[in-house]
Amino acid sequence: MTASQPAKITPTSTALAEAYWEGCRQGELRLQQCDSCERHQFYPRVLCTHCGGDALSWRAVSGRGLVASFTVVRRGISKAYPAPYVVALIDLEEGPRMMSNIIVDDPQQVAVGSAVSVTFQPWGGDHVLPVFELARVDS
Amino acid sequence: MANPGEALRGKVAIVGAADTEVGVLPGRTPMELCVEAALAAIEDAGLKRTDVDGLLTCNAMAQPLMYHAEAMAEYMQIFPRYCLSVGAGGGTTFSVVHHAASAIVTGMADVVVIAMGDSLRSSLTRDQAMQVQASTGHPQFEQPYGATVPAYYALIAQAHMAEYGTTPEQLAGIAVACRQHAARNPAAQMRELITVEDVLASRLIADPLHLLDCSLVSDGGSAIVLCSAERAADLRHDPVYLLGAGEGHTHEHISAAHSLTTSAAREAGQRAYAMAGLQPTDMDFAQLYDCFTPTVLVELEDLGFCDKGEGGAFVDSGALGPGGALPVNTHGGLLSHCHPGNPGSMFALTESVWQLRHAAGERQVENARCGLVHAQGGIMSSHTALILSREVA
Ligand SMILES: [Zn+2]
């Protein structure tokens, strides 16, 4: 890679979140689930934000969700982000909300409430990030 | 419910206020702007530099300093016994007024200067500008997705539109009203009147936000001086009393907000009204944080000026403009007066002082007695509402 090649922003790494990123590299979206109250949470933390419990286990989740809100970025944050692209908040089936991109040819197809499902994209280095696609409508 | 603000209500007053020129000011450092504003505010109060024993500032993006307030005190050669630089983004200004009032009432300081300045327009390097954009958001779970600052606020606008049927035209109406005020303010950076059509015809930045839904990028500094109501009675100008102050803090990252369309401005407002013993209908004007048009929409609702979901209709009613039922951002706001970053709300504060002194010239709100100022920092994260009045009663 040359120095002039624009690079995407990569996530800083922490030991706690390693299971999340390892899941992404394996094509699996993982969330923390509380051993006590069994609720899921995102982002990863040392406590359960629902009951305060500190016993948390990583679980693979469905990767399905609904668009809580979205925007089409028309002026990219850097050359590594060619506009237009969709930044969205996704409400996952298991409860937590996360930010991501929705990968779509025509941003006009995205709406609040759209069903989406996870997919994974290389992000530079050994980083792999979860992004979303519009769920296929069954006919 | 006990009134937690009883000890503060009406006990502290703003006795000095000053802005530097704002807009495009090449060659002036943020510290110079900050000091210039502070000296002018002290002069406005009829006090001396050596009377100041409390100093509150915020850092400047274009000239970051590890200990900003100490650096400013050193520059001015004042030696305060209460000295602090605070970082709560756009919400810093009113949060520190709350703190300054507490410091005065508890005897930590007698005369407190709050001073802020930055030169985002002229001094920010390309790298610093990029850093400002890229450092907003969670470094692991938000930033990599490339949301710009307008994009984060666009998420709020889009959610409000989906939930309540708010339209881009109604968002645009907020920018139009701010510009109408700015047209009457000789100090404002942008004074040429605009229409809803102009806003919608300006280029899309992050759907549904157009360029004219976004605040300005400016240079400027601003400062106020506070002291006890007792001492204020002997000073040069009519005091502007702090009757209410309330804060609300719900999240840092927008993906962790419990609601996209209702903010902690609600709690901040409720706490400020309770302390003041006043209601939204008692306010003669409101200065509402307007980094992007949707923030004003949500704040109008959360601060009780209209019902939840009715912000768009309230804008349509013409309430926000000059002579309206609730003039909003009578100086022009961040959208039209100036926005040098974290100091942005200072100008809403100094404007409120001039309105309540009945010294706001052509843009004076007739018989203004009481006003609410609100600011938020982060992405609708940290909220403070203040209620100011020319009367203690
Ligand atoms: Zn739990």
Image (cartoon, coloured by chain):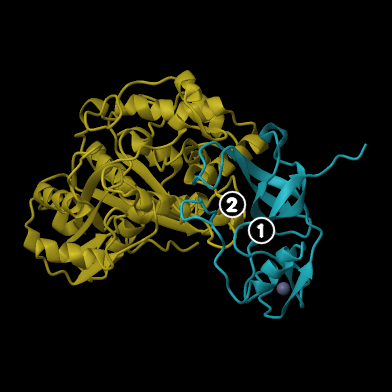
Chain colours: A cyan, B yellow
Q: Residue furthest front?
A: A2
What residue type is disc 2 on?
A: Tyr
Q: Chain of mark 1?
A: A
Report whether residue B317 is seen. Answer: no
Q: Chain of mark 2?
A: B
Q: Residue at horizontal 46%, vertical 51%?
A: A4
Query: In whole angstroms, how far apart are the C-alphas of marks 2 and 1?
Result: 9 Å
Rendering coords of residue A40 (x, y %) = 74, 66
Residue identifier under label 2: B145
Rendering coords of residue B6 (x, y %) = 36, 61
User: Under tag 2, what secondary structure?
Assistant: helix
Mark linked to residue B389: none
- The reply to whether dot 2 and dot 1 touch (C-beta < 8 Å) is yes
The crowding category of the residue bearing disc 1, from other C-alpha atoms within 10 Å (few below 14, some 14 to 19, many at least 20), is many
Mark 2 lies within 8 Å of ligand 1 (Cβ measured): no
Compared to residue A102, the image places residue B186 above or below, namely above
What residue type is disc 1 on?
A: Leu
Q: Quadrant of residue A84?
A: top right
Q: Are marks 2 and 1 on the same chain?
A: no
User: Under tag 1, what secondary structure?
Assistant: strand
Rendering coords of residue B380 (x, y %) = 50, 50
Q: Residue at horizontal 54%, vertical 25%?
A: B169
Compared to residue A124, the image places residue A116 above or below, namely above
Q: Residue at horizontal 64%, vertical 75%?
A: A47
Q: Which residue is nearer to you in this view: B38 or B359?
A: B38
Q: Which residue is nearer to you in this view: B313 or B237?
A: B313
Report whether residue B252 is seen. Answer: yes
Q: Quadrant of residue B144?
A: bottom right
Mark linked to residue A129: 1
Q: Residue furthest right?
A: A139
Q: Quadrant of residue A110?
A: top right
